[in-house]
Amino acid sequence: MVDLSIQLAPKNPKGLLLANPVMTASGTFGYGTEYSDLVDIQKLGAIVCKGTTLKSREGNPQPRLVETASGLLNSVGLENIGVEAVIREKAPIWSKWRVPVIVNIAGETIDEYREVAERLEGVSGISALEVNISCPNVFSGGIEFCSSAISAAAVTEKVKAVSTLPIVVKLSPNVTDIVEIASAVSAAGADAITLINTVRGMAIDINKHRPSLGSYFGGLSGPAIKPIALYMVYKVASAVDIPIIGCGGINNAQDAVEFIVAGASAVQIGTANLANPGAALDVLDGLKQFMTENGATNLRAVIGKARN
Ligand SMILES: Cc1cc2nc3c(=O)[nH]c(=O)nc-3n(C[C@H](O)[C@H](O)[C@H](O)COP(=O)(O)O)c2cc1C
């Protein structure tokens, strides 16, 4: 029998124990509810819901998705129903599920992050928060929270102060030194770190002589970013002592194993869900098969092997 269970918040009294390490990535699997008729979502390790802000948001102008070589550019702009609707309409459904749901939160000010976390405190059906710090900080002229260790740590601290849930901080690759940022959020009390969010990019429509995306710039995801994500997981896992959740271009079980061997304790499947809603479950099946074929009985024994 292969043991795929993993504790992603060992330092938190509530803990975040997953039956297996395969999760869906924020913004690529809705609220999970949209997929419950298509695939057996209860088999997943966890579901991370769409980015949630204090007020509902309409998001960026169309077009918001452009395919690129081995990747996808998106500029959805955090379109979402807002935290109160999540509490009212989604959490009661999640509370009946076996699969843990992690709410991805975002804000334009530190207070907004704090307030969203405060409102989610004590709501049944929510197992953890994932704090997306790649948002423009309106008080710093639009500079993203993730781009300085000081602001990344400040958001982490504020959210930790108002929430007893495990706090996962999701980092952006669009920084000079990922290890510095990861170390700062770890020191500020993060229970785990997700690496990575999308890589900033753009595409040009040569017929219109214009950027292809309505908001000009977007975030690149999919297989094109996997080597960047692997590098960051490897570097950060060597520097911090909290669990890392690997994300970026994972399409199959082999990709997932690469992240785990690089130092990730769990993985998230993002863009692959858009083409195949069963992608995360396929990764899970393949992971079980890989473990069996290699005579491995415990996933935890494989984590970070590449660093030994
Ligand atoms: C359409 C789309 C929407 C996304 N929305 C969010 C979001 O709301 N919050 C967030 O933290 N990440 C968001 N992401 C980033 C993904 O969760 C993930 O970090 C990224 O796409 C890299 O993984 P992948 O290559 O497997 O897609 C989004 C990605 C896509 C493609």
Image (spheres, rainbow, N blue to C red):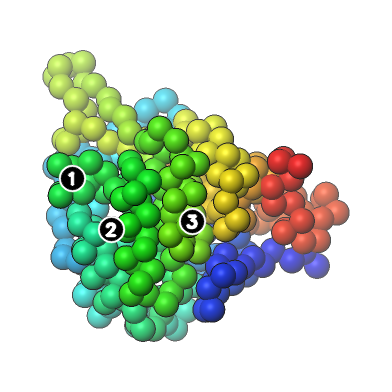
Circles 1 and 3, Cβ within 8 Å, touching? The answer is no
Q: Is mark 3 within 8 Å of ligand 1?
A: no
**Residue 112 placed where, x, y %?**
21, 63
Seen from this angle, which residue lies furthest right? 295
Secondary structure of the residue carrying numbered label 3: helix
* Quadrant of res 94: bottom left
Secondary structure of the residue carrying numbered label 2: loop
Q: So how many labels did they put on this image?
A: 3
Circles 1 and 2, Cβ within 8 Å, touching? The answer is no
Residue 106's disc number: 2
Where is mark 1, residue-wise?
140
Q: CA distance from mark 1 to mark 3?
A: 23 Å
Nearest to viewer (mark 1 / mark 2): 1
From the viewer's perspective, is residue 255 above or below residue 29? Answer: above
Q: Give the residue at x 21% y 28%.
A: 212
**Residue 162 placed where, x, y %?**
33, 75
Which of the two discs, 3 and 2, labels the residue nearer the N terminus? Answer: 2
Circles 3 and 2, Cβ within 8 Å, touching? The answer is no
Under mark 3, the amino acid is Ser
Q: Is mark 1 within 8 Å of ligand 1?
A: no
Secondary structure of the residue carrying numbered label 1: helix
Where is mark 3, residue-wise?
186
**Residue 98 placed where, x, y %?**
52, 78
Q: Is mark 2 within 8 Å of ligand 1?
A: yes
